[in-house]
Image: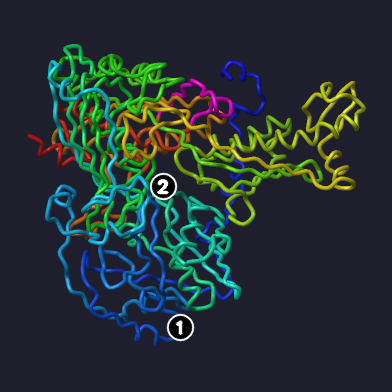
Amino acid sequence: MSAGLLSNNRLIGSRHKRIDASAKVQGATIYAADFTLPGMLHGRVFRSTQAHARILRLDTSKAEALAGVRAVVSAKTMKLNLYGNFIKDFEVFADGEVKYVGQAIAAVAADTEAIAEAALGLIEIEFQPLPAVFELTEAIKEGAPLVHPDLKSLKGHPLATPEGNQSSVTVIKTGDVEQGFKDSYRVYEHTFRTAPVHAGYTEPRVAVGQWTPDGDATVWSNAQLLFDTQSSLAEIFGISPGKVRVIVPAIGGGFGGKLRIGMEHFALALAHAARRPVRVMSTSHEELSAALFRQPAHIWLKTGVDKEGRIVAKQGRLLVDTGAASGSGPLIASTGVTLLAGPYKLPNLLIEGRSIYTNNHPTGSVRAPSGPMSNFASESQMDIIAHDLGIDPLEIRLRNIIHEGDLSPTGQVMTQVGLEECLLKAAEAIGWDKRNPEKNRGKGLACAAWMTSRGSSGAYLKLSSGGVFTLMVGVVELGTGALTGVAQILAEDLGVDVSDITVVSADSQTTPYDFGSQGSRTMVTVANAARMAGENLMKKLRPMAAKALGVAEVDLELGGKGFSANGKKVTYAELAATANMGGGGLTAEANYIADAVAHDPARVSKHYSPAWPAASFHVHAADVSVDEMSGAITINRYVVAQDVGYAINPSNLEGQLEGGAVQGIGQAIFEELVIVDGHVMNANMTDYKMPTAMDVPPIEVILVTHPATSTPYGAKGVGEPPTIQPPAAIANAVFSATGKRIMSLPITAEKILLHD
């Protein structure tokens, strides 16, 4: 449905306030960190100080004897199973050997946090150091210390390719890249590096665990993926998923950093041992030294072009450091190869992505996983090529980008492509015709495509007395406003106000299965499920309304919180009362999963997400000044032009794009976890620099609309893309201002000053 046909709609496309706004601004929302239970104990985790070592002795007796300590658990006292999404290589507690600094060795539950902390200091341990490897390029060399010598024996995903210190390898290949380089006018070859960064959520990871006498477990946490957490906990404790209930009261930000198990397994292990509920919450030091960070990456990229700057051949290799467990690494490396190729027409292509083990802390899936790293390399090199050939960076992109009907790197036919419009509008907004308005000031841009991922969503819909609809979904509201958009769409379909829709979410026992808040899919997929449930409920309501009004169903008109015909009306409230008195409640359900999108399987090997439903397109443009004495970067203006398909709620979209851009700016010029031999050296909020309101200008947002064909009103995913382009856009702007090309993140004043 085109945007023009929706201009007069009352709810769709309106700036409706968030359905959770009032409770949050009034402080009434109960977050996971606020949640308590009677008799609850407090847990703390005893972690390794060694990157790789054999545990010679572990003595917890003094901790156990401390007054107020109720339980101490370790691999010696509790047998728990290995877990992991792609390879089962995570241990809850180290068993005989530690593989990274920060690895959990034991945990303590006590009456207070202070007692639990004191008990950690009483645990005695002796290590025998073992060889370790910390650098990506060293880890892949023959003879490097193996992080998992038993890797081949571990259970894994069919697409995983465990070998040495490698957990996966994904390849995209088409054409003849070697011949393409021979046919090229010029060939460019560069190496780029990116640093690990934290997801930056406000609320630390936290979980409250409890067991019943019958062996049922319940955990209240701020997990992003309700059902993935449920299945992982069931796997760890060797019980049926139906015996595990996961509830997310509310979450204070996630950004991918809470996709995987965080504190839930520790809380349940301690609760099982203590036979009382236990809460475990990470400290700020743990967040910055023992969380699931964005992977550091090493990227090699070689591109051949003709005289006009059109790409003839492209070859690259992306290495991502997954730390001592594979975590999300295989998926990151897989997605990364597509992003490294870029949104361009590529006749000859060979891109390889590999996830690599090291003895660093395991990493995770931070917002737009792999996006900023790959895009930084690809879009920086596009500007390098443009500068060398004397072609405007905007023009070289316009000559190479995909358009309607072109093929993606994996052979997917691209449709509803808004990339050219995004490029032109972003360039116009940033004042591209004056790229260097003054000394040490310049402008840069970067473009990309991203997914609206698949995965199943379920919806239960109930019409209650009084005409209120209750929608139950298993997805977690991360603070994006996605469920507000779902409520707007459902209210529009049903002819009611948004206030007539009550949304209940994120309880694995009472809400239907959902793939989860990830992959920019939440609003799109959940809304489709909700609409289908609404249609199924209408199949029950229409015959009732027709009977009540004495007309045929085809004569019914929907609206005004009910149906009307021939001047008469019956409301939803009246229909609910009739059903409750005589025919039982009015309920419906539905499940939705996006259709698989065709691609060319001959082009890909071991790719986890080779084709994207409802792909989105986006361009960022930055105007920066660089102080020639200090090297300090000032962002004067910043523009985001994104093809959102259709803006269900423009305010929510603008908020997501503004916040995502700021998060990307953080990775571009501020944020870096400095890791030396596995130890995080800046695990505090003083030394780990995040952008503040003083560091970024207002973000100018341009909503471009090329509606998708299979989503509600043509909407596309928006949550992840705005973090992708800032590093490349700012790097290109810094070069425009200074003539200095920075090849690693973050782009610091020191790097600019020391650049020769």
**Picture coordinates of residue 326, whole percent (x, y):** 31, 53
Q: Which residue is mark 1?
A: 68
From this view, report whether residue 98 is shown above or below residue 645.
below
Q: Is residue 695 visible?
A: no
User: Furthest-top residue in view?
Assistant: 308
Quadrant of res 528: top right
Q: Which residues are magenta?
A: 700-716
Determine whether label 1 and label 2 are within 8 Å by CB. Answer: no
Q: Residues within 10 Å of mark 1 (few under 14, many from 20)?
A: some
| Residue 613 belongs to magenta span | no
Viewport quadrant of the N terminus: top right
The answer to whether residue 124 is above or below residue 282 is below
Q: Regarding mark 2 in the picture, which secondary structure is present there?
A: loop
Q: Is residue 552 visible?
A: yes
Image depth: mark 1 or mark 2 in front: 2
Q: Which mark is residue 256?
A: 2
Q: Residue at x 16, y 21 (%)?
A: 179
Three-letter amino acid code at the position of disc 2:
Gly
How far from the left and from the top, in percent, is residue 520?
A: 46, 37
Classify residue 193 as left or right of residue 80. left
Give the Cα separation between the discs numbered 1 and 2.
Answer: 36 Å
Q: From what the image shows, is residue 14 above or below residue 261?
A: above
Q: Residue 499 versus residue 155: which sits nearer the camera?
A: 155
Determine if the magenta segment contains residue 712.
yes
Left or right of 754 in this view: 538: right
Q: Quadrant of residue 66?
A: bottom left
- Which quadrant, please, contains the C terminus? top left
SS for callout 1: loop
